[in-house]
Amino acid sequence: LSECQQSDLTMAEVSACLDSVTKVVDRELQTWVKNHIFNLEEKALINGRYSALKMFKRSQSNFITFRDNDCRWQYLTVSPEKGANITYKKCYIHLSQARIKELSQVK
């Protein structure tokens, strides 16, 4: 992400850089989500209780909705020529990274 914030980059270059970071972050987040789903499915098969799995899936769905809405309002506060798309992408990356950190700390 810091590479994308170099002062000598154009807005188009920053946007393209943030797109590549977004792809990496999305893959990492998806890996963590799948890992938790797999673990919760295994536990549910053993103990017969699927509530934790259902709640995790709901929390992930709620996170995606929250991330979209939170970044969208920030996007709307910035005019397009001032980099509204960059604002959205940075928000998306930061929130995704926070979710990854949260999921990585759950045992």
Image (tube, helix red, strand yellow):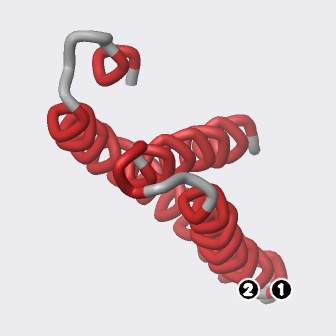
Quarter occupied by residue 100: top right
Which one is in front, 66 or 83? 83
Question: Dot 1, crowdedness within 10 Å: few (<14), some or many (≥20)?
Answer: few
* Secondary structure beneath label 1: helix
Q: Position of residue 90 (x, y in %)?
A: 48, 41
Q: Tag 2: residue type?
A: Lys
Q: Position of residue 38 (x, y in %)?
A: 53, 67
* Secondary structure beneath label 2: helix
Which one is in front, 79 or 5? 79
Quarter occupied by residue 1: top left
Residue drawn where x is 70% and y is 70% of the image: 66
Q: CA distance from mark 1 to mark 2?
A: 5 Å
Residue drawn where x is 71% and y is 77% of the image: 62
Q: Which residue is mark 1?
A: 51
For this view, does 33 lie left or right of residue 67? Answer: left
Which one is in front, 57 or 93? 93
Q: Kindly indicate whether the residue at mark 2 contacts the one at mark 1 (C-beta within 8 angstroms).
A: yes
For this view, does 13 lie left or right of residue 44? Answer: left
Q: Tag 1: residue type?
A: Ser
Q: Is residue 45 above or below residue 77?
A: below
Where, quadrant-wise, is the C terminus in this rendering? top right
Q: Which residue is mark 2?
A: 54
Q: Position of residue 88 (x, y in %)?
A: 49, 53
Q: Is residue 81 above or below residue 40?
A: above
Residue drawn where x is 42% and y is 43% of the image: 82
